[in-house]
Amino acid sequence: MIDPVKLAQHLLRIPSITPEDGGCQELIASHLEELDFSCERMPFGEVKNLWATRRRTGPMLVFAGHTDVVPPGPVEDWTHPPFEAVIEGDKLYARGAADMKGSIACFIAATTRFLHDFPDTPLSLGYLITSDEEGPAVDGTAAVLRELGTRNERFEYCLVGEPSSVKRVGDEIKNGRRGSLSGELTIHGVQGHIAYPHLAENPVHRFAPALQALVSEVWDEGNEDFPPTSFQISNIHAGTGATNVIPGHLQVSFNFRFSTEQTPESLKQRVHAILDEHGLKHDLDWSLSGLPFLTQRDGTLVRHVRKAIESVTGQMPSLSTGGGTSDGRFIAQTGAQVIELGPLNATIHKVDEHVAVDDLRILTEIYYQLLVNFHTDLMEQTG
């Protein structure tokens, strides 16, 4: 059997800052090939991707994750070097410990144990691993799925190992995510001397009432599964740097995190209507990074995951669609049921990112029980 902690340390000692993989996927493939997985390397641009499958007669459950990590920041700020994977007390410190090499190690340990215990299972298994989740997310999971689509390769279920837990492992799982729509807005005015405002047109002043309207707008009330759609300004810039010049242009960056109550088109229409109502001369460029998705709470995947967590921890997890985006947004568009389940998210992207050693063992047990639940269900269906 595989020790998930030791495997996690091995992966964490590889400094795979996005979009680098550094050999992580070859290490993963070496374990999976011993389990009779067919491993296909699918590089796109600078990004490495691994698509590994063990096809049998039953539906396929895919474990999805990423080997790339965000930069550690100033190394001197860390208690332990970010790529030494030091265990101190009950914590494993390293960049990527929680997000998300720890989960990948648990995937492999659970899969190894499951196939040892149930070598003839009809359950098909897959791994979709990328080195482009923390970066642009263009040549990673999305690119692999496009290629699989051209080959008519499908899978029914997917567990993404993103750190979903809040206070204890398995207390919360993501059965959906909000969509993300960004805008780059330019308000056009007329530049001039600040002492002669009648000869200029200040775009900051012109935009102020529209800004108030945008931030005051109630876009929707959300629903049973999603919080209300939110609108947030992230950057505003105007001016030449001189204190006596009225700017000629104002640049505004904003973002919507939107629920299934909205579509990108409905949000765009309402924003343009507000801007037009205030008579603003403007240009607006839109960028959609993900649509909202939802895996039904009474679906097969959610049911098996919740049962697995309850059997290991004794507590039923809550369902959530909050937080940022993940590669689940691409996978859900294929029609697969998708959930996210991983370790605590309290230290992700922070200095001294870490995961509790015991949590890796608990997570491995949950993943194992999930596989057993699928296997048992399939055996009962076939009589």
Image: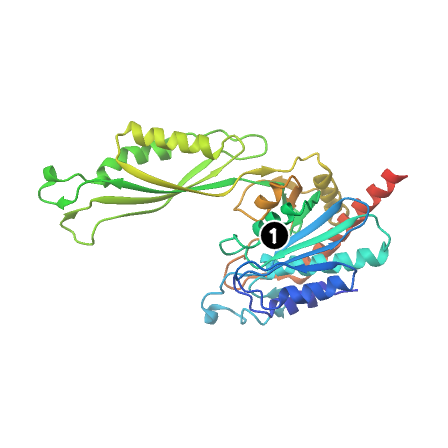
Q: Where is residue 114 in the image (x, y as percent from the top left)?
A: 80, 55
Q: Is residue 222 left or right of residue 232?
A: right
Above or below: residue 222 compared with residue 195: above
Q: Quadrant of residue 209?
A: top left
Vertical placement of residue 47 versus 273, above or below: below
At x 23%, y 36%, the residue is: 206
Residue at 45% of width from left, 37% of height from top?
230
Seen in the picture, residue 18 relative to 80 is either above or below; the reply is: above
In the displayed orientation, state which residue is furthest to the right: 383
Instruction: Tell me if residue 11 can be seen.
Output: yes
Vertical position of residue 118 compared to residue 14: above or below: above
Residue 162 placed where, x, y %? 60, 52
How many dots with numbers?
1
The image quadrant where one finds the C terminus is: top right
Along the viewing direction, whichever of 25 and 75 lies nearer the viewer: 25
Amino acid carrying mark 1 in the image? Val
Q: Measuring from the top left, give residue 35's x and y in whole percent.
A: 78, 61
Q: In which quarter of the image is residue 252?
A: top left
Pointer 1 residue: 144
* Rendered location of residue 27, percent (x, y): 67, 67
Along the line of sight, the residue nearer the viewer: 1 or 128: 128
Please tell me how crowded label 1 is: few (under 14), some (14-19), or many (20+) other residues with Cα within 10 Å.
many
Whether residue 165 is visible:
no
- Residue occupying the point 61% across, 52% down: 144
| Apparent side of residue 155 relative to residue 208 in the rendered image (left or right) | right
